[in-house]
Amino acid sequence: MQTITLQPAPRLSGKVQRLPASKSLSNRVLIIDALAGGGSDIQNLSEANDTRLMKNLLASADPVWNAEDAGTTMRFLTAFSAVQPGTRQLTGTPRMKQRPIGILVDALRELGAEIRYLEKEGYPPHEVKGIVHPRTNEVTIRGDVSSQFISALMMIGPVLPGGLRINLKGPAGSRPYIEMTAALMRRFGAEVAWQDNRINIEPVAYKAASYTVENDWSAASYWFAFAALARASEILLPSMTLRSLQGDRIIATWMESLGVTCQPRGNDLLLLHKDDVQASVQFDFTHCPDLAQTIMVVCAARQIKGVFTGLHSLRIKETDRIAAMQRELSKLGATLLEQQGTWILQPAPQLPESIETIQTYEDHRMAMAFAPLAAVKTIRIENPHVVKKSYPHFWDDVQHMGIRLTGF
């Protein structure tokens, strides 16, 4: 398997050239536009593989849709297919077939969709026959499941004859993503109200609209990590503001404790390294799980003890991210251990002289979370092409910032 080597560059300065648009926003906008009948003017759509896949499948008349390794694509298209005429099969990679979808399927069945599993009960692949005779306009779903299940249901609400009422059992996890979905639905004419644990969606049709997708805060988080680990840095993030629909914008606040000052520069953000950091930090990733790997690597590299909660969803991502991080952080001399639902990251007093090759487990965020170590050490990362899932030009931007890559 291909491995790239990143040579140390302790001083980083420049503007990130190809920061991607938000994949989360792009995928939602594509579904909403399709439910509106198309015709919207969508600008700055993400170039991520997941978004390209979503766009291509929505335009395909093929009776079998292969969502590959894209969890959002699989979940959103399952709900979308439930409100389309005819029958469609959805499948994916072997890892996708291990990622549960039963909670979403059960809710869609309650609404009147006919869905059968083609292999393992509760997991893709599955066959969806669109709702012909709705059984109800109200479903109950756990709030602590993947927000993608809840968002998938929300987006089809306006096209159901009686709209949709979603009752959330318990507190909602990844709440910013649900709020993002509601905001986008309203932008395209839907009427959505969220009060307490009840989401009400009226049967008001979507309308085509103009929309420009924000740049991606999840992608920006890796540049915060570069700034934190470099000896000195002046990194400019283009077209980024602290006012955003994306919950991952919290990285700007959290990184203040880890060695980064973030300053607005017109429509851009300037990231500056600072030496002073806290000895220990406590973060809850319930609403922003995609930041966990990045934060963990920074803590391990800057000898900061981390106390983390809200990591439960990491077990069912592109890989088991908890297990993957435990293995790879050990190469930095750090440990990640659970204590009654709380995870404790204990860094080593210093990084080892030589760091073993970082494995990525076919997970784009593993590659990008560990790449910032190049600010302090020579680092080798296997299977670098996994970044195409969300940030296709990541390595180009890394090289532009002055870090030399070999083997790529």
Image: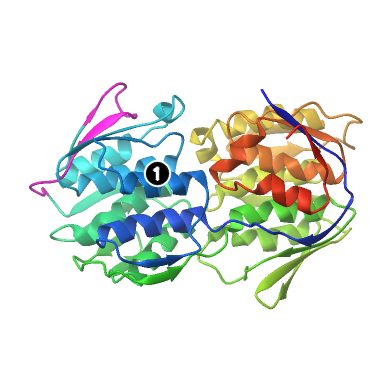
Q: Is residue 281 visible?
A: no
Instruction: Note whether 201 is above or below 136 in the view shown.
Output: below
Closer to the camera in the image, 89 or 281 = 89
Q: Is residue 308 visible?
A: yes
Closer to the camera in the image, 113 or 103 = 113
Question: What's the magenta region?
Answer: 116-135
| Residue 259 left/right relative to 44 | right
Quarter of the image for the N terminus: give it.
Answer: top right
Q: Position of residue 386 (x, y in %)?
A: 60, 36
Quarter of the image for the C terminus: give it.
Answer: top right
Q: Secondary structure at mark 1?
A: helix
Tell me where residue 368 sits by quadrant. Answer: top right
Quick check: is 119 in the magenta stretch?
yes
Closer to the camera in the image, 382 or 285 = 382
Task: List the single residue furthest toward the bottom.
Answer: 266
Neighbours of disc 1 within 10 Å: few (<14), some (14-19), many (20+)? many
Check disc 1 and report the residue beneath it: 73
| Residue 48 left/right relative to 31 | right
Q: Position of residue 53 (x, y in %)?
A: 42, 44
Residue at image point 60% right, 48% down: 391
Quick check: is 21 in the magenta stretch?
no
Tell me where residue 215 sits by quadrant. Answer: bottom right
Q: Main secondary structure of the magenta part?
A: loop
Label tally: 1
Amino acid found under the numbered disc labelled 1: Thr
Task: List the single residue furthest toward the left.
Answer: 133
Residue at image point 50% right, 53% down: 23
| Residue 147 left/right relative to 268 | left
Q: Position of residue 123 (x, y in %)?
A: 34, 29
Instruction: Note whether 399 is above or below 95 in the view shown.
Output: below
